[in-house]
Amino acid sequence: MSAILQEKETTLYLGPQHPGITGNMMIELKVTGDTIRKATTHVGYLHRGFEKLMEERLWMQCFPIVCRICVPEPDPNEENLARAIEELEGREVPERAKYIRVMMLELSRMATYLLWMGGQSGSAGLYTMPQWTVGDRDYIIDLFEELTGGRVYHMYIWPGGVRRDLPEGFEGRVRKVLDYLEQRLTDYDRLLFENAIFLRRAQGVGILDKDMAMEWGVVGPPLRGCGIAHDVRKDEPYEVYDQLDWEVITHEGSDVYSRAMVRRKEFEQSISIVRQVLDKMPSGPVHNPGPNPLKWRVPAGEAYVKTESARGEFGYYVVSDGSLKPRRVHVRGPAYVHGVSLLERMLVGANIADTSFIMNSLGTCPPEIER
Amino acid sequence: MKNIKGALVPFSALKYLGKKPHTVRYPFEKKKTAERYRGFHFNEIEVCIGCGTCSTICQNEAIDMIKIEGVEPGRGDSGLRPRIDNGRCCWCGLCVDMCPTGSLSLTDQYLHTSPDPDSYLLIPGVDNPEMKENISFTKSDTEPLLQFDRVPMRELDGAERVKSFAEVVLGYMQEEARAEATRCVDCGLCVTACPDHMHIPEYIGAIAEADDAKALKYIYDNNPLPEMCGKVCTRQCETVCAIGHLGEPIAIRWLKRYATEQFPDPAAILNPKIAEPNGKKVGIVGGGPAGLSAGYYLALRGFDVNIYEALPRMGGMTFAGIPKYRFPLDSLDKQIDYMKKVGVKMHNNVRVGKDITFDKIRNDNDAVFIGIGFHVPYTLGLTGEDLENSIQAIDFLRRVNIGETVDVGKKVVVIGGGNVAIDAARVSRRLGAEVTILYRRRVEDMPADWEEIEGAEDEGVHIVPQGIPLEIIGENGKVKSIKYGMAEMVPDDKGGRPRPKLIEGDEHILEVDTVIGAIGQEADYSFLPKEIMDELKIERGRVVVNELKQTSIPDIFAGGDNVNRTMDAISAIADGVRAVEGISHYLLDE
Amino acid sequence: MSDTLQKEEQIKASINAAFRSAKVSIQRKGRIIVEFRGGILPAFASYLKEYLNFKHLSMISGVDWPEDNQFELVYHLWSYEQSIHVMVKVRLDREAAKTKTLTPLWEHAETYEREIHEMLGVEFEGHPNMRDFILEDWDDLPPMRRDFMTREYVDEVYEWRKGREDAQDVRQTIAEQYNTEVPNFNNEDK
C-alpha cells in the first residue's frame, strides 16, 4: 500500500445492516488505510420506545413487550420484570418454578451462545459454523416451543412463577438435546475453537484493558475474558443458583479469543447446570397466582434486579407508584455499555475487517441498546 | 505441531458424509408444531359470552369486539364476538389465559400470506371453524390469571343464629371488599341480567379503587334502596357473571352492601341536587320498593310526592315479609330517612280504600302510581286448613315483623319451597320451634335461594322433599297433626320439569302445633272503585302496563309485584325507576 | 436479620459521617438507597467510588415526577467486593433540570447522560459529547416525560389501518341495549 493512501483519512459507514450483530446499527469509521482512527456509533434504527409503552400498559401487559427487548435472548427480560414485581409485592415463587426458571435461563444462554458462535465465526469468514450452530440452536428452540408454545418469544416466566408446568416426558427430551449438544462440542472445537484461522484472527485482537474493564462497566463474558471472576449468578444469587454446583469461568487474555473461550466453557457449564436442575427439580405447583391482571396494582416502591444474561448483567430498575401501570421500567442491557462507548474506544487502532469480529465478541445487540 | 493439527482438523468433517442430514428434505414435509403452539386464534362461538376481556388485556389492541351475524345479545351475552387483527397480534396468548369462559384458544396453524390487509382480520370460530381440530394452546386450570374463588363471607354460626333475630350475614370488611372487587373484569354482562340495569362494573371498579364514595354515587344513580338490595336482592346479576362460568361469580350483592354500609348518611356523600318544584303532584299507593323508588326520583326531579302505606312502616314486603335477621329495621330506617330528606312525603297507617279513597288521591294528584304488591296468600286447599293454628306465612311474617307476639308452639310444619317458606321456617326456629318443611319436589327444585336453604339447614330446619300434604288433622278445633304422602318424580309429558306423583300408600302423619302455608300470594285490588276496575286492564292478577309503566288509564302508573312476574325487590325498583320516566314524560311532556 | 445487614449498616454509617446531605436507607440485603440533596454530586459519587469501592456504574435512570415538578436521576452503583448495590437519587427541578456530568468518573456515563438528555431534557454540565443518541432531529417534547402523550403522538404521526372501525365497546353496547346511560363520576369533586 502506498504511503499516500495510508495517510489519507477516509470515512466509511458500516451498517446499518451488516453481519455480525443481531439488529441494525451503524458505525461511522474514520480510517487511514485499513486502520480505524476513530469510530462513532449511530443507533436509532430499532428504537421502539418500549420503556415509554410500558408506562401506558397494565403490569401484565408489559410481559409481551419486555421479551422483545432482546431478540436472541428474551428470557432474562421476563425473568427481570417478574422478579422486580415479585420483590415489590413480596410474592413468593414456588420452588419448582424457580428450578424451571433456571432451566429456561440456561437453555436460553446456550441458544444465545450457539447464535453467537455462528456470528463470531461468520464474521471471520468461517461459514460452516453458523450453519451448524444455527441448526443446533433449533433443537433448543424446539424445546422452548414445546414448553412455552412460542419458539422465540416465550412469554413464559411471569410474576409468581412460570406460565405452565413441564409437559409429559419433557425432562427426557431436554436431556437428549443436552447429550447431543455435548457431543457436538467436539465438532465445534475442531471447527472453530481450535481452528488455526480462528486462533490467528482472535488472539491478540480486540484487547480490553483489564483495569479499564471494571471502570467501564464491562460485564459478562468480556469481563471474565479479562480473568476477572464476576458473575451475577454468584455475586447476587437469584432463584436456585446458590444450590447448584458450578464455578465462575474466567480466561486470561482480554482478547476476542479469551472471550470466546469463556463462552465456550460456559456453554459446557450450562449443560451441567441444566442437568443438575433436572436432577434436583422438586414437584409441586409452578405458579403463585396474583390479583386479576386488569385491576392489579403493584405496591408503590422501587426495585433493581439483575440477571446474568449471555452477555452479562441485565438489570431492570422498576418503579411503581402504586397504580395499575408502572411508573418507570428502565432496562440496563449489557450491550448498552459494550456496544456504544466501549466499542467506540476499542475500535480505535483496529483493522476494518475486525470491526464485526470485535462487535460480536462484545455481544453487541442494538435492540437492547435502544429498547 | 499445533498448526499442523489445525490444518488437518477440517478434514475430520468428512465423517459427516455418511450421516443423515438434519435439514428438511424434499418432498417437503411440514414440521408438526408442539402441542402448546401459539398460532392463530380459535373461538368457541357458542361458549363465548362476548365479555371482551380478551380485547381489554390485549396490549397490542389487536382484538376488536364486533357484532356478527347469528349471535344475538341477551341475558349474559353482549352479542359481540372478538375479531383479531393478525397484523398486530403478537401471539402472547394473554387473551387465552384471561378468557373467563375458556372459549378462546390458539391453534397450531400459523401460515398466512396475502397482499390484502383485510385478510389479516380474523373472526376466530367464524372465519376458521375448521381450526377446531387444531386447537393447541388452551387456558390452564392450574396456573390461572383470573381469580375464581370468592372472598368468603363471614356469618354467624347456625347454633348462635337461632337464639335471636341478629343479622346472620356480617358483611365484608374493607380489605375483603377490595379483594373481592378486584376479581371483576369490568365486562358489564351482569347489567344484562339486572332488572334495574344498575351500573355494576362502575361501582365495583370504584370499590376496587378504594373510592367507596364514588361507588355509592354509581349505586344511587338508579337504585334508591341499595342497602336493602345489598342484603336481600335475588341477584340475577351473579347468575350471569363472566367469572361465574368457570369459578364463583363476583359477590356483587355483598359488594353493594359493603359500599352502602360505609356511610351512615348517604346524603352527606351524594349531595343530591333537587330540582326546583315543578308544580306537579304524584300520589303513590303502597310504600314498597316500587313506590319508594318512584317517589325518590320524582322528588329529585321537583315533583310533589305523597306515599300512602297501610302498614306502620314503609318498605312493603321488604319490611313486612323479610325477617329481620336478613334485613334489620335500622337499615330500612336509614334508607327511608334519607328519602324523607330528599322531600318524599310519607303517610303510614293509611289504607287506601278505607282511610282515604282512591278517587281522592287521584283528584288531588296529577298522576297516581300503584305499587301495592301481593299481600294476600293463596290457600292450600286442604281439609283442616281452617283450624286454629293453621296460618299463612305472609301473615305470620308480617305479625312478627310488626312486633306482635306469635306463639307457634313446639312443632311447626311449613308447606312450600320458596323464599317465603324458608323465611317462615327460619323465623319459627328463632321462636323456639322444631321446624319441618314439606315440599312437593326435590330440594334442587326449590325456588328459594340456595344460600337460604343452606342457612335453614344450618339452623336445624328439617326439609322433607317430595312430601305432599294431604290433610290437616285437628282436635278441639286446633291443629294436631298433618298427614302427607311421599311422591316420586315422573317425567313431564309436555317436556317440562319432572312432576311429583304420589306413591300409593306411602303416607305419614306428623304431630304438629302449627301449620304454615307458603305457596304464593296475590294482589288485593278491592280498594279500587268499580269504574276504575272496569277500565284498568288486569291480566291474571297483574296490572298491564307499557314500557314506561303506564296503565290503560293514562294518569295511572303501576309497578312492583302487582305488575311484573319476577316478583322481587329489584324488579320493583326497576319498575319504579321506569315509571319516573313515564310520569315525567306524561306530565312534563319531556 | 440485623446481623446480616452488617455491611449495609457500616456503609450507611460511613456515608452519614461524611455527607450530611445524604439520607441513607437500607432497602433490603444488598440494596441501599441514598437520597442525595446536596449540590456536589460528583464529589459524592467520587467518594462512593474511591473510598467505598462502588466501582461499577450499572446505569443511570431518569424518572419523571411531574406531581413534584421534579426529575429524579438514579445512579446505580455496585460494589463487587461487598456485593451491595447502591441507588443514589438526585432530584432536579423539572423546569431547569441541570446537573454535573459524571463522565470524569465513569466514561460510559456518557451514553446514559446522552440518553437522559434526549429523553427527559436534563442538561449535564461538562458533558464532552452531547450529540443525538437515539432520536435524530427530534423537536417535540422529550418523549420520556410523563406529559408526552404517546397516544396523541401516534394518532398524529401514524395512520391507523382501515377496516376496524366497526369495533364496539362491550360496556357501552350493553348500556345501549337497555337504553341506559352510564354516568361518569370520575372527575367529580369529592
Image: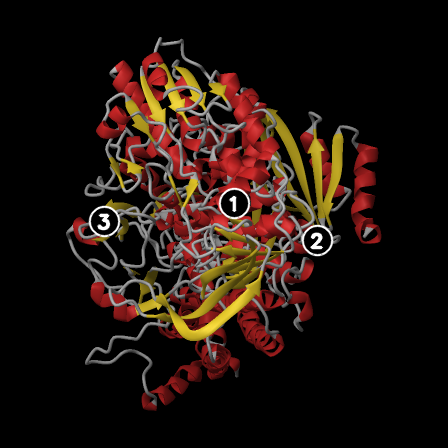
Q: Is residue B543 depicted above or below A274 in this figure? A: above
What mark, if any, has residue B182 been given in the picture? Answer: 1
**Most distant residue in the front direction:** B476
Q: What residue does disc 3 label? A: B72
Q: Is residue A353 above or below residue C111?
A: below
Side of B66 relative to B106 (left or right): left
Q: Residue at x 75, y 28 (%)?
A: C21
Of labels 2 and 1, the one closer to you: 1
Q: How many marks?
A: 3
Say which element carries label 2: loop
Q: Nearer the viewer, mark 3 or mark 2?
A: 3
- Residue plotted at (46% across, 32% down): B219
Would you identify the image quadrant in which residue B94 lies?
Answer: bottom left
Q: Position of residue A41 (x, y in %)?
A: 43, 44
Q: Nearer the viewer, residue A334 or A236?
A: A236
Q: Earlier in the sequence, mark 3 or mark 1?
A: 3
Of circles 3 and 1, which is in front?
A: 3
Q: Is residue B2 above or below residue B490?
A: below
Which residue lies most toward the left here?
B116
Could you say which is closer to the camera, residue B100 or residue B408? B408
Chain of the residue on which disc 2 is drawn: C
Q: Check disc 2 and give the amino acid type.
A: Tyr
- Position of A89 compared to A74: left or right? right
Labels 3 and 2 positioned on one and the same chain:
no
Q: Position of residue B141 (x, y in %)?
A: 47, 64
Query: What is the spatial separation of the Cα atoms under label 3 and label 2, in whole angstroms?
Result: 65 Å
Q: Amino acid at mark 1?
A: Thr
Q: Secondary structure at mark 1?
A: helix
Residue located beneath label 2 in the image = C80
> What chain does badge 3 belong to?
B
Give the residue type at disc 3: Glu
Mark 3 to mark 1: distance in Å?
Answer: 29 Å
